[in-house]
Each structure stands twice: as structure tokens, then as C-alpha cells.
Image (cartoon, rainbow, N blue to C red):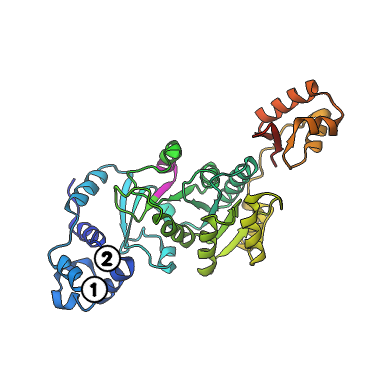
Amino acid sequence: MALDNDLALWLRLSLIPGLGDRSLHRLLLSFGSPQQIFSASRADLAKVVPAETASIIRDGGAGGENLDAVASWLEDPANHVVTLADAEYPQALLEAPDPPLLIYVKGRTELLNRRSLAIVGSRSASPQGIANAESFAKALSDAGLTIISGLALGIDAAAHRGGLAGAASSVAVVGTGLDIVYPARNRDLAHRLAVEGAIFSEFPLGTPALGANFPRRNRLISGMASGCLVIEAALQSGSLITARLANEQGKDVFAIPGSIHSPLSKGCHVLIKQGAKLVETAQDILEELRIPFSAVRPPDAMAAADTQTQFLLDQLGFYPCDIDTLCERCGLHSAVVLPLLTQLEIDGRIAALPGGRFQRLA
């Protein structure tokens, strides 16, 4: 497949080594379009960018092999390259710091301009955190908010699953080229997003998972969304970077509180102290964003538990508990408690934790 000439020029411009987004925007402001940039004199270009870069532009740019790779990649009708000049470009990103010159997209480009909410959090999330991410994401997706996250393990992946299960789907913003799935454990989820939602990246094909790429990805996650919900974050979590960027961009920041003893709650508690809105339900977020509550579909009612099972759940509470302590609380023998715990785990109402402990899921 041959590349359209205009698209080829956009790609050549984006692939010039050492030319960042700010310099690219200065060139566009000075000359108007990639075609006019490549037609400009070396002297005029050198007024905007370093002389060495001006020479590369006058020589037609670089990245011939990359262009061939993009041409092959675009043979799949699910794949797209969207430039600043295209209507499909996410308009919300135009207000974010240094919006990328172009993005590579796999999936439904119409989702890029839907109203959305970012959901981020720990990669090492607890079972309750995973359950919260999925349930919040589904409710918010059903209310019309496309769920944005970063395809990481833990909270990100759960948020994508919940968004896909709802009406407004989900979009992943990644820190690699779109010909690479990172982390590999999320390959099936990535393939599902490519069909039912969308994945996009500002990084050229072949870009590996480099640490410096992920903070850049985070600015796009926050830039795309109307607000940012943080579910479980340690004090050094990258999710706090996304929340800070959202706050700097004038977006609402939401956080779910947790146990004062859990390291995964510390980041959320810091955000709340700094002014993030404490939320307990999806409706709390919808109220802040002025989206009608009636848009939320009620969750399926779980079958009523028998008296003994409900008693066990009440005694378990929402903090991790080992079986000996639970038996003591209930006044029941382990031979009675163990089968009940097994069934509750199968039903998805509790989760088994390391060390022989159990935790109730909301």
C-alpha cells in the first residue's frame, strides 16, 4: 500500500530525530503545513530550528524504512494515522501540553472525541481495587463516559474491562509503538480493545517500552479526559503523575479512599488532602460532571444469601482476615466455614489473599 503524499509528509516531519513537539508546533505556526515546511529554504528553517535540523528538513527528512513499515501497517483497515489536520484528532488534546503532531490508532477512531473519564491506579492492585475499577468503569461507561486508561496491569486493565462491558467502551493510551503489546500479559485485552474500543500512541511503530515514554503517555490520558479517578495508588505511583497533570489541566480529580493501614491507599489519601474529590459511588462522579444519574444502569442483583452465609460475610467485614480469626468471630468450626468461603470465592463475593487470608468484595 502506497502512502498518501500528504500523510507521508506528516510522517516524515514527525520522524525527524531530535525534533520535539514544541519545535514541530513552531514550524507549523511559522510555515502552515508540512508541505510548506519541506519547501522552505534552509535559511528560513534555521530561524525556527537549529541549523542541523534545518538541513535534515531540506534534505527531505528521514525515516524511509519507518514509512514503509507504516504503509504495511495501514493495510489493516483497523489501523489509522491521525494528524492534527484531521477531524478525528482528539480535540481535547489540543488543550494539553505539547499535543502530538500525529497519533497512531488501532480501532474505533470515533471514540477519540467522545466525552471520557480517566481511571488509573496501582499495577499491584488488591482484589477489592480490581473490583472497584471494573464496577466504576462499567457504571460510568453506561452513563456515556468512554473510559481512558493506560493498558497497564492491575487497575488500568480492570478499568478497560469495565469500560468495554458498558455502553461507551474504552480507549487505551500506550507508551510503545502499536505493533508492540506491553505488557504482554494484556495481549488478549489489547486485541479486544482494538475491535470493540481503541488503542492509540504518539510513538512510532517499533518503539519499545522505555521508562521515559510513560510520563509522556500520562499527559495524554489526562488530556483526553473530563476528569481522572484514582483507585489505589502508592505514594510513588505513576498514577499520581496523571492526577497532577489532570489538575494542572483544570480537570476534576477523584479518589477512592481505603484503609489507613494499606500502602495502596496512601496515594489516594494524599490526593484527597490536596483537594481531590472523595468518591464512594459512580454517582458521586456523575454529579460533579453534571451527568444525570438515570443514565446509570443498576447492577444485576446478586442472589440473596442464606442466613449463615450472610452472617459469615458480616463477620468477615471488608478488611483481610485469616480463617482462624473468622472462625473465632463466627463461633463456627472450620469444617463449616471453609465450604462457605469456597462458594463465596466462586461467586466472586470474596477473594483469597496471600497468607491464607480472605477479603470481602463490595
Q: How far from the left and from the top, in percent, is residue 115?
A: 50, 58
Of the image marks 1 and 2, the number of the one nearer the N terminus: 2
Please, what is the three-letter code of the amino acid marked with disc 2?
Answer: Leu
The residue identified by callout 2 is 19
State if disc 2 and disc 1 touch (CB < 8 Å). Answer: yes
Disc 2 secondary structure class: loop
Please, what is the three-letter code of the amino acid marked with disc 1?
Answer: Val
- Quarter of the image where the C terminus is located: top right
- Magenta range: 192-199
> Can residue 124 be seen?
yes
Looking at the picture, does residue 46 appear above or below residue 131? below
Disc 1 secondary structure class: loop
Q: Nearer the viewer, residue 275 or 224?
A: 275
From the image, give the main secondary structure of the stretch colored magenta.
helix
Q: Nearer the viewer, residue 44 or 289?
A: 44
Membership of 254 in magenta stretch: no
The residue identified by callout 1 is 49
Q: Nearer the viewer, residue 238 or 158?
A: 238
- Badge 2 crowding class, 10 Å Cα cut-off, few under 14, some 14 to 19, many 20 or more, is some
